[in-house]
Image (cartoon, helix red, strand yellow):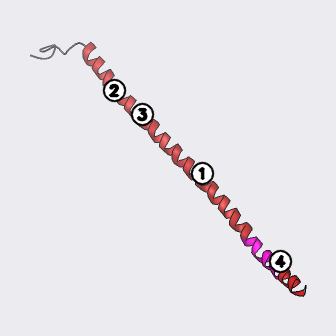
Amino acid sequence: MELLQTLLGVLFVLGLSCGGWLIWGVTQSRQRKHELALARERELTKREQLRIESEERVQERADRIYLDAVRRHTDPPPIEGGPGKP
């Protein structure tokens, strides 16, 4: 019986001394998981932002090309030998 009490006492002391480290490890694990989720979300947000900016640049270029074509086909052509030219 004395041996059992000693063994239980030692296990209790070990549990008390290591319990803090176990709780710290679990807390760190959860915090790391949360940080990784945030990093993943930031990366997805950045990719989406870059995709939107790329689509905007494509649309702006298409608009410039269209407006240039409209201007070239609707503006009157320059007159050769007009006023001020011999």
Structural distance between the alpha carbons of marks 3 and 2: 14 Å
Which mark lies nearer to you, 1 or 4? 4
Residue 12, labelled with which disc?
4
The residue to which callout 1 is attached is 38
Structural distance between the alpha carbons of marks 1 and 2: 39 Å
The kind of secondary structure the magenta stretch mainly shows is helix
Q: Earlier in the sequence, mark 3 or mark 2?
A: 3
**Residue 86 rendering spot, x and y as whole percentages:** 8, 16
Bounds of the magenta segment: 10-21
**Residue 14 rendering spot, x and y as whole percentages:** 78, 79
Q: Quadrant of the N terminus?
A: bottom right
- Tell me the amino acid under the disc marked 1: Leu
**Residue 48 rendering spot, x and y as whole percentages:** 49, 40
Q: Is residue 20 left or right of residue 51?
A: right
Which mark lies nearer to you, 1 or 2? 1
Q: Secondary structure at mark 3?
A: helix
Residue 55, labelled with which disc?
3
Front residue (pair 71, 54): 54
Q: Secondary structure at mark 2?
A: helix
Residue 64, labelled with which disc?
2
Q: Secondary structure at mark 4?
A: helix
The residue carrying pointer 2 sits among few (fewer than 14), some (14 to 19) or many (20 or more) residues within 10 Å by Cα, namely few
